[in-house]
Image (cartoon, grey):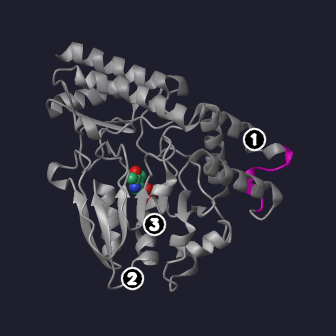
Amino acid sequence: MSNRQTTYNFNAGPSALPTVVLERAQEQLVNFEGNGMSIMEMSHRGKVYEAVHNAAIERLRKLYNIPADYDVLFLQGGASLQFSMIPMNFLAEGEKAGYIMTGSWSEKACKEATAEGATYEVASSKADNYNYIPTTFDVQEGTRYVHMTTNNTIFGTQFKSFPTFDVPLIADMSSDIMSKPIDVTNFDMIYAGAQKNLGPSGVTVVIIKKDFLATAKAENPTVLKYETHAKNNSLYHTPPTFGIYMLGEILKWIEEQGGLTAIDQQNKDKAALIYDVIDTSEGFYVGHATKESRSLMNITFRLQDEALEKQFLTEAAEAGFVGLNGHRSVGGCRASTYNAVPVAACQALADFMKAFMKKHN
Ligand SMILES: *Cc1c(COP(=O)(O)O)cnc(C)c1O
């Protein structure tokens, strides 16, 4: 039997949620705001749910300063469906889209676009096993849009600033959305699955410029058109009502933390605790990403040999650390330090890493 207090959750996604948010949801679970039923049992066309739905959209708009000429949508199918929906809506035969290749998720996004039209690489760090963020970009004339992944969940790299192009830029922000203040107007479209920084899985947030949306192809199935959801305030069909309620509660919690500037500082402090141990370990721990490209959300590292790495992961698990195994495609270790991971958990991991090093060095 584990308990929440002594379990340090570093899962990559779905990942930790703030305890206070779960407790509030628990309080409201059976009888939501005195309506005699849970939020899950209500009509998505009723006043109570509608207020929850619109409040979540408003909070997103406020926290990210989203201008009125952008729509905020709640979709289903995860970020993975966006990999297909984007080219289905915005890439016609004879057109081409540019992809910035910074990891496995970029590869997956590009692969889906290749099924719809032509694609090419605007930049790639693949030759170095995606251990850095490219800084030079080659955008070809006649490009329909450029796609980027702002944080590379598997390799542990992150854009610290965003490139700007004179063609529409689309960003997969699944693993660093709402982790810091950003300028939304740098992008024509932003999307993210909720399960890393925004709540439980099942909701996908899309922030899309109306002018860009208006350029979409017309011939897609109804639910796969952005226009359908924009016209109907994401209520064309039944939305994932409980997930959207939770997302709203998470955004409220971000406000309570002091907003995105405060969250950003917390995330920097948390990551620094762990990166400092790696940097002062004299090679006992080896970070995967180059220093300039390091992610504040996913910290990837290795130990000198696989046997020691296995020992590290075994002892860490015994000490209550969860989710430290690297992604199955790259191995090694990874600590995901999303918004809801407490400073105390990161301090505990830093302490554990130091103690392990002392014991095995
Ligand atoms: C997790 C993740 C995805 C996949 O999200 P799903 O919601 O599972 O489809 C896509 N892109 C990035 C950057 C991710 O971290």
Q: Amino acid at mark 3?
A: Leu
- Give the residue pinned by disc 2: 92
Please give the name of the residue rendered at 75% of the width and 41% of the height, measured from the top-left corner. 28
Would you identify the image quadrant in which residue 81 lies? bottom left
Q: Determine if residue 147 is in view.
A: yes
Q: Amino acid at mark 1?
A: Gln
Determine whether the residue tagged by mark 3 lies in a helix, strand or loop: helix
Q: Determine if residue 107 is in view.
A: no
For residue 104, above or below residue 110: above
Q: Nearer the viewer, mark 2 or mark 3?
A: 2
Crowd class of label 3 (few under 14; some 14 to 19; many from 20; radius 10 Å): some
Q: Label 1 vs label 2: CA separation?
A: 47 Å
Q: Label 1 vs label 3: CA separation?
A: 31 Å
Specify the principal SS of the magenta part. loop
- Give the residue pinned by disc 1: 28
* Residue 296 x, y percent position in the rendering: 38, 36
| Residue 77: image tag | none
* Residue 160 x, y percent position in the rendering: 36, 43
Q: Write down the region rendered in magenta.
A: 34-43
- Give the residue pinned by disc 3: 81
Decide if ligand 1 comes within 8 Å of the CB at mark 3: yes
Q: Label 2 vs label 3: CA separation?
A: 18 Å
- Front residue (pair 283, 266): 266
